[in-house]
Image: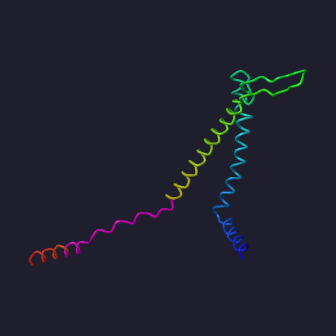
Amino acid sequence: MGKSSFLQEFKAFAMKGNVIDMAVGVIIGGAFGKIVSSIVADVIMPPIGLLVGGVNFTDLKWVMKDAVVEDGKEVTAAVTLNYGNFLQVTFDFLIIAFSIFLFIKLLTKLTEKKKKEEAPAAPPAPPAPSKEEVLLTEIRDLLKEKK
C-alpha cells in the first residue's frame, strides 16, 4: 500500500508540466553547450591562436616539475598547470552565457509584446452629460442652497 502510493505520487510529480519542461530545457541546453564549445574550440580559438603566434590554447601549460626519465622510460610524469584548458573553458562559458543572455532578452521582448497586444484597452471615458442633465444639476444645487 505504501509503495503504490509513493509510486503514484512520483508519477504525478514527474508528469507535471514544469518538470517535463525543465527536462527538455536541460537536454537542449546540453546540446547547445556542445555546439558552442565546438564553435569556440574549432572556429574562434584557432584564428586567435594564430594571431598570438600559432598557439593552441588547450596545449598551454606551465611545467612545475619536469618528468623524470631513466633509460628512455618515463619514471614520473611531469607536474603541469594546464591554464590553456582553463582559458578554453572560460571562453566557452562566456560565449554560452552571452548567447543565453541574448536568447532570454529576445524571449522577454516577445512576451512583453504579446502581453501588450492581449492587454485589455482602457475603458472609454464616460460621455459628457447632456444639456438637460447639466441644467437639472444646477437646479438641484440651487434648491439645496435654499434649505
| Relative depth, front residue between 57 and 3 | 3
Give the position of the N terminus as an image quadrant.
Answer: bottom right
- Is residue 128 highlighted in magenta? yes
Query: What count of labels does the image hold?
Result: 0
Q: Quadrant of residue 53?
A: top right
From this view, report whether residue 104 is shown above or below residue 18.
above
Residue stretch rendered in magenta on the structure:
117-136
Please give left or right for residue 17 compared with residue 117 in the image.
right
Q: Position of residue 144 (x, y in %)?
A: 13, 76
Q: Residue at x 56, y 53 (%)?
A: 110
Q: Which residue is drawn at 78% across and 26% down?
A: 78
Q: Position of residue 103 (x, y in %)?
A: 61, 47
Q: Position of residue 109 (x, y in %)?
A: 54, 51
- Is residue 126 highlighted in magenta? yes
What main secondary structure does the magenta stretch of the protein show?
loop
| Relative depth, front residue between 124 and 47 | 47
Please give left or right for residue 51 compared with residue 122 in the image.
right
Q: Residue at x 69, y 27 (%)?
A: 48
